[in-house]
């Protein structure tokens, strides 16, 4: 093949790929399945629960330190 033939072949393939990409983008290839959306929601809920638990532990530690510094009445 000569250079012009190669260029034409590459141009045709890239045009076909662009058409395929446009088709699948319009068909919703990028949208999540129900199972993936459910996993993402579960992961987000688990992250939120872990953050809440860590915050509760931090607050409990701060409260214990404050209570330790306060003397009990005699």
Image (spheres, rainbow, N blue to C red):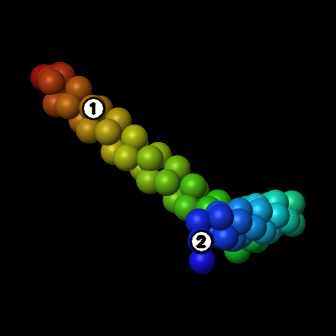
Mark 1 is surrounded, within 10 Å at the Cα level, by few (under 14), some (14 to 19) or many (20 or more) other residues, namely few
Q: Is residue 47 above or below residue 63?
A: below
* Element assignment for label 1: helix
Q: Is residue 71 above or below residue 30?
A: above
* Element assignment for label 2: loop
Q: Is residue 55 above or below residue 45?
A: above
Q: In the rendering, at what x and y percent does residue 38 appear?
A: 68, 67
Task: Return the mark for residue 2.
Answer: 2
Q: Quadrant of residue 36?
A: bottom right
Q: In the rendering, at what x and y percent does residue 40 appear?
A: 62, 62
Q: Quadrant of residue 2?
A: bottom right
Q: Who's the residue at 18% across and 22% down the image?
A: 70
Q: Who's the residue at 40% across and 41% down the image?
A: 55
Kindly tell me whether residue 41 is visible in this rendering.
Answer: yes
- For the N terminus, the quadrant is bottom right
Q: In the rendering, at what x and y percent does residue 59 appear?
A: 35, 35
Q: Along the line of sight, which residue is nearer the eye, 55 or 69? A: 55
Query: In the figure, is residue 69 to the left or right of 2?
Result: left
Q: Along the line of sight, which residue is nearer the eye, 21 or 38? A: 21
Measured Cα–Cα span from mark 2 to mark 1? 77 Å
How many numbered discs, if any?
A: 2
Task: Return the mark for residue 62.
Answer: 1
Q: Earlier in the sequence, mark 2 or mark 1?
A: 2
Q: Who's the residue at 57% across and 55% down the image?
A: 44
Q: In the rendering, at what x and y percent does residue 14 appear?
A: 70, 64
Mark 2 is surrounded, within 10 Å at the Cα level, by few (under 14), some (14 to 19) or many (20 or more) other residues, namely few
Label 1 near label 2: C-beta < 8 Å? no
Task: Return the mark for residue 53.
Answer: none
Query: In the figure, is residue 52 to the left or right of 4?
Result: left
Q: Along the line of sight, which residue is nearer the eye, 30 or 73? A: 30
């Amino acid at each position: 093949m000569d250079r012009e033939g190669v260029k034409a072949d590459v141009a045709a393939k890239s045009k076909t790929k662009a058409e395929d990409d446009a088709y699948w983008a319009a068909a919703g290839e990028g949208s999540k399945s129900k199972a993936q959306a459910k996993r993402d929601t579960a992961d987000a809920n688990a992250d939120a629960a872990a953050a809440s638990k860590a915050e509760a532990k931090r607050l409990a530690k701060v409260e214990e330190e404050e209570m330790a510094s306060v003397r009990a009445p005699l």
